[in-house]
Image (cartoon, rainbow, N blue to C red):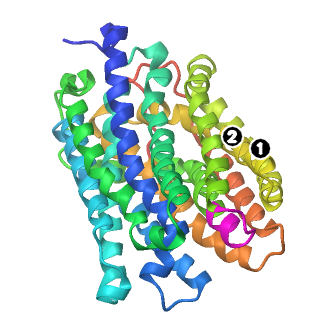
Amino acid sequence: MHDARTVRVPSMLRLAAASLAGTAIEFYDFFVYGTAAALVLGPLFFPTFSPLAGTLAAFGTFGVGFVARPLGSVLFGHFGDRRGRRPVLVASLLLTGASTVAVGCLPTFGTIGVAAPVLLLVLRFLQGLGLGGEWGGAVLLTTEHAPVGRRALWSSFPQIGPAVGFLLANGVMLALSASLSEAQFAQWGWRVPFWAAGVLALSGLWLRSSLTESPRFLELDDHARVPIAEVVRHHWRLVLLTAGALAVGYAVFYAVTTWSLAYGTERLGVSRTGMLVCIMAAVVVKGSLTPVMALLGDRYGRRPLCLAGCTASALWMFPMVALLATGEPVLMFLGFTGALIAFIAMFSVIAAYLPELYEPRVRCTGAAVGYNLGGVLGGALTPIVATALAEHSGRVPWAVGTYLTVVALLSLGCFALLPETRPVPVAVAEPVTG
């Protein structure tokens, strides 16, 4: 039988590169919507609202994608646990890519009225459904091929995908923003990044066509009949703890990449280009440090790194909002970078940590549901809550800093209740039962 420990480094490199590329493409689709929501979707799809209400409504449709992600985890996780990890990657990429292209073709409120925001909501839901299946498949395919002593390192490659996807999405937005007038960007320019998702999705499908099935899945003799039922029955406590633990990562990331973009342009008067450059530079640092943090996770353990990142997040939220409020590019970059370093200390090892907590027969469902529920708690709510809190704050949005600090402390408590998994082999790791 094919043992994951015998997989050669060149094969792991090809697998990790394909997983990274596919994850980057899917997160490009997801992030390009978030950037558009912060910049233009409010007035285009909710023109009868005030500027604040329009932004909140756009962020509301943004949040729907997060609500759909756990449902996607259940749907695609079922097939991932019963049919294999590889088919999930193809189906999820097709769904996310098609719905993203459709957003770019969608008529605005001025053309079809109230049907426009309704259709926008539906397409965002389908985006989230696809992405909910993507993470579990991509991470497990890499993790279950990797040698035990380097599992965190190899599984960190799909975790670099979100940074690459974010940079692609915002790089296209930045180029369009810099080269088009405000009227051109609002009329058709914002659609181009959504159309580009179709080309990227086809590229991703080609890259994934050569991937082999997870050896750990092939070794299974007994597949769960209804994986989500087993997860709810035997692992409910673990799902809740991991969702609560990961909430801070989502909250920090989307506070930096989505809420601060809207806050900086609308409240501080910073140019759209200036804000995008600051945020993108911080994301480059985060992406570059991901494998370094993962190596520390292989050496010192997953849980210590998560606890350290969560503590750093709690300590940095007030300085971050203070640096953002200056409107000075260098200071904003410093604030964003500190927050994203704390974030990646946790999320660089999550792709190894979560699968190790679940038994192989329900791993695709359990790990992905916990991961994406954390997105509902942290990612869906943060842009909405932060925008509302900042509206009633002064120049420095201390209320936003308070909110993020509270989320970090709650997540810290959840991480403290989770066990360490390194260096237990993935096939025999003891699950935490309810």
Disc nearer the start of the sequence (2/1): 1
**Residue 295: quadrant of the picture:** top right
Left or right of residue 252, residue 323 in this image? right
Horizontal and vertical percent position of residue 85: 24, 35
Magenta-colored span: 261-271
Left or right of residue 390, residue 71 in this image? left
Task: Decide: few, some or many residues near mark 2? Use Cα within 10 Å; few <14, some 14-19, many ≥20.
Answer: many
Horizontal and vertical percent position of residue 283: 60, 41
Task: Decide: few, some or many residues near mark 1? Use Cα within 10 Å; few <14, some 14-19, many ≥20.
Answer: some
CA–CA distance in space, label 2 to label 1: 13 Å
Residue 169, above or below 326: above
Res 61 visible: yes
Horizontal and vertical percent position of residue 120: 34, 74
**Residue 429: quadrant of the picture:** top left
> What amino acid is at disc 2?
Ala
Q: Looking at the image, is mark 2 or mark 1 nearer the viewer?
A: 1
Q: State the residue position of label 2.
A: 342
| Front-most of residues 181 and 204 | 181
Left or right of residue 232, residue 323 in this image? right
